[in-house]
Amino acid sequence: MFANLSERLGATLKNLRGQGRITEQNVKDTLREVRMALLEADVALPVVKQFIDQVRDKALGVEVLQSLTPGQALVKVVHDELVAVMGAENAALDLSQQPPATVLMAGLQGAGKTTTTAKLARHLVERENKKVMVVSCDVYRPAAIKQLETLAKDVGVAFFPSSADDKPEAIARAALDEARRQLADVLLVDTAGRLAIDDAMMAEIKSLHAAVQPVETLFVVDAMTGQDAANTAAAFGEALPLTGVVLTKTDGDARGGAALSVRTVTGVPIKFLGVGEKTAALEAFHPDRVASRILGMGDVVSLVEEVSRQVDMDKAAKLARKVKKGKGFDLEDMRDQLLQLQNMGGIESMLDKLPGMDQLPDHLRQKAMDQATGGGDVKRNIAIISSMTPRERRFPDLIKGSRRRRIAAGSGTQVQDVNRLLKQHLQMSKMMKKMGKAGGMKKMMRMMGGAGGMPPMPPGMPKL
């Protein structure tokens, strides 16, 4: 997300950082480029105008013009205004009412409401220790009910069964009664979507809202629709008292216009970002962190939080002790590293949060990804290792010609892919062995970045 905008803004503001003097003319030239970058990112025109006016006023103020580093001061003005446009700070869910707190999920068909409902349920269970129940009121798409039931089982939350023969309001009321009986903390209500906004859809969602009196009404919208996302959210906001927005499919949106438009157009905050297909791929929206990522400053705070949540510290410590004793780094260890990497949203998601990664040439960025994934796709490499026998994982030297062909066939890959993975593992194993002898725990853990955890930092970048 924000790749195009980040590239354009980064190139524009780079010229300012080292300048010893800021004039009205170079501010004007810079803001012209910033305006074009925002419009190309599909940011709503009124938002662009307001943003440029605010930055211009502050850029020509005393704080910037009399700063010892006026170029950097102007970059900070742009950063602060990006934060202000997107909402200043994270707006958490308000679940403080008498349980069960009801959350209504609204939006158009195809925006990802059902998947987002499951993601939010997992988020509330894992990060806020809530007891959650989910229910589907989408009686027009029976597959949606089954989909939510399957997802609820996957994330470990209660599912209230419903049928296409029932009335949505009756389903919601019955689910609320059952949530009270089960002493659930939160009830998430998934609603029906349409291909476009229509009177019947709005009437139904209004009656549902009246039936359950939710504490939170979240509008789920596809980020890839750009300005339309903000406009659709505004239309829903006229019919419902929205309390927040969830932007989905942000991993496929290189522009980011929706994130910069929604708050201003609707008046309600973005609360979450959907960053992938998995149920763990939901991030709380922090405007300050997102602004830093747009300007190429990275988002180390979110990265550290993600690592802390997803990395199995016991396994990491066990591996460190194992290598230190000279027992080697086998393919089982490599698979554990890749699985943890996958749980954190993949290497690209992590690289995007590192300062300066957007400025790396493509070949260096690809090299960092290859180091962290074993030279290829994470899922593919996990499949290759999973197709090996336990003995083969512990003793990779056993894997010769016929075994390699069997492993390739079992994982749906080519023998060349197996060869590439084994070569990468051999390199990692040699590095582990060398570090285990020469540098002790500290060097070994730093080196583990190249083995499937954090990628090694490019020269001049801060160490985590």
Image (tube, helix red, strand yellow):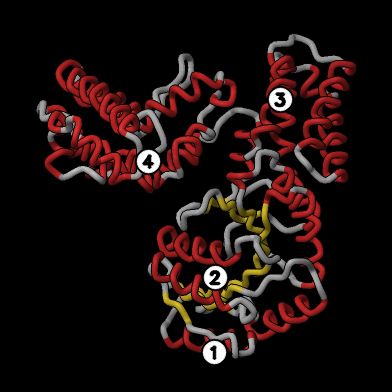
Seen from the viewer's position, the closer of residues 291 and 21 is 291
Nearer the observer: mark 1 or 2; the answer is 1
Q: Position of residue 464 (x, y in %)?
A: 41, 28
Q: CA distance from mark 4 to mark 2?
A: 44 Å
Q: CA distance from mark 3 to mark 1?
A: 53 Å
**Does residue 99 appear anywhere in the picture?**
yes
Please report whichever mark, 3 or 2, sits nearer to the chain's N-terminal start. 3
Residue 232 shown left or right of residue 399 in the figure: right
| Disc 1 to disc 2: CB gap under 8 Å | no
Circle 4 packing at 10 Å, graded few (<14), some (14-19), many (20+), is: some
Residue denoted by label 3: 75
Nearer the observer: mark 4 or 1; the answer is 4
Q: Position of residue 282 (x, y in %)?
A: 52, 53
Residue type pointed to by label 1: Ala
Nearer the observer: mark 4 or 2; the answer is 4
Image height check: is 348 above or below 31?
below
The numbered dot on residue 96 is 2
Residue type pointed to by label 2: Ser
Q: Position of residue 89 (x, y in %)?
A: 63, 48
Q: Kindly indicate the quadrant of the structure image that contains residue 419.
A: top left
Q: What residue is at 79 percent from the left and 72 percent from the top?
A: 239
Q: Secondary structure under badge 4?
A: helix
Q: Secondary structure under badge 1?
A: helix
The numbered dot on residue 174 is 1
Q: Position of residue 19 (x, y in %)?
A: 73, 11
Image height check: is 118 above or below 402?
below
Residue denoted by label 4: 380
Residue type pointed to by label 3: Val
Q: CA distance from mark 4 to mark 1?
A: 44 Å
Seen from the viewer's position, the closer of residues 72 and 242 is 242
Residue 345 shown left or right of residue 222 in the figure: left
Q: Secondary structure under badge 2?
A: loop
